Image (tube, grey):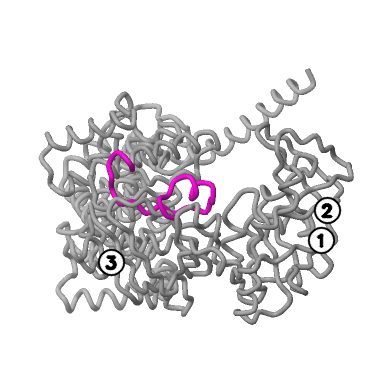
Amino acid sequence: MADIVLDQITKRYPDGALAVDKISMDIADGEFVILVGPSGCGKSTTLNMIAGLEDISEGELRIGGKVVNNKSPKDRDVAMVFQSYALYPHMTVRQNMGFALKLAKTPQAVIDEKVTEAARILDLTQHLDRKPANLSGGQRQRVAMGRAIVRDPAVFLMDEPLSNLDAKLRVQMRTEVSRIQRRLGTTMVYVTHDQTEAMTLGDRVAVMRSGRLLQVGTPQELYESPLNLFVAGFIGSPSMNFLPATAEDGKLRTPLGDIPLSDALRQALERSDASRDLIVGIRPENFEDASLVSADARREGITFRATIDVRESMGSDVYVYFATELGNSLAAAELQELAQDSGRADTGATGDTLVARLDAASRLQEGEDAELWLDARLVHVFEPGSGKNLALGASPAASPVS
Amino acid sequence: MATAATTSRQKVGWGTANLVVVALAMIPVLWMVSLSFKTPAAILDPSYFPSQWTWGNYSSILSTSQFIRPLVNSIGIGLISTFIAVLLACMAAYAVARLRFPGKSLLIGMALLIAMFPAISLVTPMFNIERSLGLFNTWPGLIIPYVAFGLPLGIYTLSAFFREIPWELEKAAKVDGATPFQAFVKVIAPLAAPGMVTTAILVFLACWNEFLFAISFTSTLASRTAPASMAYFSGGSVFTVPTGPIAAAAVVITIPIIVFVLFFQRRIIAGLTSGAVKG
């Protein structure tokens, strides 16, 4: 049991490359924190620095109140689960799980007891005497978890532990990891590039990009009040729609129509002295089939017409994709990186396609010229240069990062 | 049916090719075995099988210290050289495979250079060095050059094996509380065992077969190895060539090699790293 404090942690490689840039974060005892971001954002490096597998160039790392910068992994009381599981192939499951305890010169009886207990929790009892080569992917993953559990460490570190499993098993193990963490109450730092995993697992999620920490908050905070364009686009699936907009006469002029500015937003715009060119972000669920919206609700937003390109029925909702004329395309660096990360840049899909998540009752068909409604109260407004969310002045829930 | 015909034709073709290769390799060996069983009078007899079988050649070489002592020297020098070379090569190869340090490429280059160096050019300077250091005609006098020439081979073979071992295993061991030495001994070394055995066999074979240094740096039975000792065999009279005893000795020194390879074959082939990571 221990809290972790990252104080201006920096990783600079000998060739001068800056992998992690002054990250500061307090992780409370027993908390489950997710580090999430696209590949190359420094999340694994950060985890390795917490584990002691990589040196910390600058800054201070404290685990349980003690500075551990110069301590080797074995003196930090951390356990780690690796993406490749890193099971010792020449040892049985039992030996794999007991290895750390054996190194710590724990009496054999205690080792046996702890391994048996962990095997019971993870449903591995009948596999204890097998070698990793003879186990399935899911079983290997559980052995890797077991190896961490038996040690009863102060901190669990997980480096994309589920990314080698197939989709169905991943969802199962996700629940399992969550259950185990709650049961053991151990502080856990979990690295993933999958925002769904991040949202479903963590008490708090830290979004990283290019070595910097962009925002730390509960999944709900990140979703509802992203501090900037990158967090907004990264969190949420399907991701947020972005449109170019200009602020004129107290309105946001967008390709979908004019969106009236709320007073708070107008003040925020004036305060921030932002240029008149802006980016508007709209979550897919903030659209609706106009025929399903009551007249009262209609007044809170705007309606517009669009041709439905593709309809995907998910059962509980319907996703519709539609194109608009965006005019000048969005050139923000964050958006390009997001497109690359999601693979959109490779598929050749243009940014002109928007996605809306409609009620399952919607009967809109592909090719239909449909009337859609947009909830104007929930639009996010970003400044293209800095990517800052200008609407945040209106919502006090934001948790700024120092 | 056409495919079946092709397959059987292919089988015949491959079988013939294999037979030719095996025959090319084996005929001289069998000829040597045959010679070793021939009586001195029948040595010049061109028939492939001896008309009269005799153990005479074997009993003559195994009954004198002229061959027994060199055999002991060969085994001793070979094993000690192999042990030292593999131990040093292990550490060097681990560093080459895992660490970044200044002069790494220089080290690899030097190792390769040593392996390529013609041994004959070193005989004279090394002879003088060994004489002045008092190493001439001693076991260390052969062990040291054997280790030196075994190392490049060992470093190359072992670093390839170390590179195959996922680095995350070592990280996992460190997080599990192992010191770097424990991580190496308990996790990396067992996984590299097939590589070590392979390297040991290769180094041992090189030492066992080595002739040039063995004949140059030895003068008596105190350190002369088996291949070198054959040059000193004498025939029945000064005018007789000791072909029979030499053939018998050659057979005797070939046997350990065959046993060695047969015994370790499975370990060389066994892929111990399977199952370490996904895939």
Q: Left of B203 or right of it: where is A342?
A: right
Q: Are marks 1 and 3 on the same chain?
A: no
> Residue at 25% across / 62% down in the picture?
A63
> Residue at 40% across / 35% down in the picture?
A133
Callout 3: few (<14), some (14-19), or many (20+) C-alpha neighbours within 10 Å? some
Residue placed under numbered mark 2 in the picture: A304
Residue A197: in magenta span? yes
Residues under labels 1 and 3: Cα distance? 86 Å
Labelled disc at residue B20: none
Labelled disc at residue A257: 1
Q: Amino acid at mark 2?
A: Phe
Please say whether residue A276 is visible from this viewpoint: yes
Closer mark to the observer between disc 1 and disc 3 = 1
Callout 2: few (<14), some (14-19), or many (20+) C-alpha neighbours within 10 Å? some
Residue B109: in magenta span? no
Q: Left of A106 or right of it: where is B46?
A: right
Quick check: A392 above or below A105? below
Task: Pick whichever, B233 or A103, lies toward us.
Answer: A103
Q: Are marks 3 and 2 on the same chain?
A: no
Point out the stretch of residues depicted in magenta. A181-204
- Determine contact: label 2, label 1, CB under 8 Å: yes
Task: Pick whichever, A342 or A34, lies toward us.
Answer: A34
Helix or strand or loop: what does disc 1 sit on? Answer: strand
Helix or strand or loop: what does disc 3 sit on? Answer: helix
Residue placed under numbered mark 3 in the picture: B145
> Residue at 81% across / 70% down in the picture?
A328
Task: Pick whichever, A2 or A146, lies toward us.
Answer: A2
Q: Quadrant of the C terminus of chain A?
A: bottom left
